[in-house]
Image: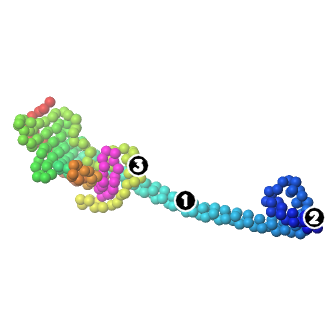
Amino acid sequence: MDNKKCNIIKDLLPSYTDGLITKETEEFVKKHLEECDSCKKIYNNMKNLNLKEETKSNKKIIDFTKKFRRKYNFLKIIVILILFFFIISFIKNAIIITSLVKKADNTLNADNYHLTYYIYDIDTIQKIDYYVINNRYLAKQMTMDKENGKTLGIMTEVYDGETCDIYYENFAELENPKDKKIVLKNVESFIPKYGYQSDIRNEGIIDFVINCAFSDIDTVKCNGRETYRFKNLFRHSSNIMETFIDKDTGLTVRNIGDWIMVGDKEYNKMIEGYIEFNTVTENDLRVQDSDDYTVQN
Ligand SMILES: [Zn+2]
């Protein structure tokens, strides 16, 4: 075969293999390859080499995909695990909270009980006694100076099943002694009936869902009671850092509010509560020396 022609073909072969030549030249090369065994051999070798390289790069892509899949599967498992534990904890919290709310409802519907609450505020301590017999109650709120323990005032609310009277005794030095003891007849209840008794009651569905999702609950003893301790209980009405809820009664045994800065003083409000059943008598619902109070309209 014509050696000169073969040399030209050899020069053209790389472009031919990659399909980078005009149709006319392609026809020319093709024809020559059919006739010349030596050039055909070179062409075949070139083609095989190209194929090998292609396979190599394909293999790289496949390896990368496999690696990615493996990583992706691992992430998928982690996400599923996190979701699984989240759902388990949500259900567990929902069961605890629901049962405590039910217990609190039952407790506060009892016929005869005496609740005592201490509220440790920034300058004062308030003691609230709440005597209940058959849906009637007397609630006595005593405010004391935190530093010297002096009584600042006593407010007594008496509810007879229909109307509410509030007796107020002021311990401050007053110009008119008649202002020392006054009574307001037939008024709205002032002392919040369930305000301090249960931290997870009557706070709405949003609070419930948030607390089921994010509450950190453990079991501890507090004031001699078996309690559930909620850390960072969410309430839209107040910020509670820690609250201890009685497992038996569903009532708050202790709750500690968030730290608040007032001036240069740092404090957190604390509430402690106690309950006794079947100790209240009719006498507990009477205001002593009620005749001494001046009726105010
Ligand atoms: Zn040739």
The verdict on residue 243 being magenta is yes
Give 27 or 10, whichever is nearer the viewer.
Answer: 10
Q: Report the side of 252 relative to 1 (left or right).
A: left
Is the Cβ of the residue at disc 2 closer than 8 Å to that at disc 3?
A: no
Q: Which residue is mark 2?
A: 35
Asked if residue 101 shows in the view, the reply is no
Query: Mark 3 packing: few (<14 Cα in 10 Å), some, or many (20+)?
Result: some
Q: Earlier along the polypeptide chain: callout 2 or callout 3?
A: 2
Q: CA distance from mark 1 to mark 3?
A: 26 Å
Residue located beneath label 1 in the image? 76
Position in image of residue 165 (x %, y %): 17, 36
Height in image: 138 above or below 38?
above
Is label 1's Cβ within 8 Å of ligand 1? no
Q: Look at label 2 and name its amino acid.
A: Glu
Residue for point 83% across, 63% down: 11
Three-letter amino acid code at disc 1? Lys
Nearer-N-terminus badge (2/1): 2
Q: Residues within 10 Å of mark 2 (few under 14, many from 20)?
A: few
> How far apart, in angstroms, are the residues tagged by discs 2 and 3?
84 Å
Q: Which mark is residue 175?
A: none
Check mark 2 vs ligand 1: CB closer than 8 Å? yes or no. yes
Q: Is mark 3 within 8 Å of ligand 1?
A: no
Tag in front: 2 or 1: 2
Q: Is residue 1 above or below residue 265?
A: below
The magenta-colored residue range is 227-244
Whether pointer 1 and pointer 3 mark residues with C-beta atoms closer than 8 Å, the reply is no
Query: What is the secondary structure assignment of the residue under circle 3?
Result: helix
For disc 3, the marked residue is: 209
1 vs 3, front mark: 1
**Spatial CA span between label 2 and label 1:** 60 Å
Dot 1: few (<14), some (14–19), or many (≥20) neighbours within 10 Å? few
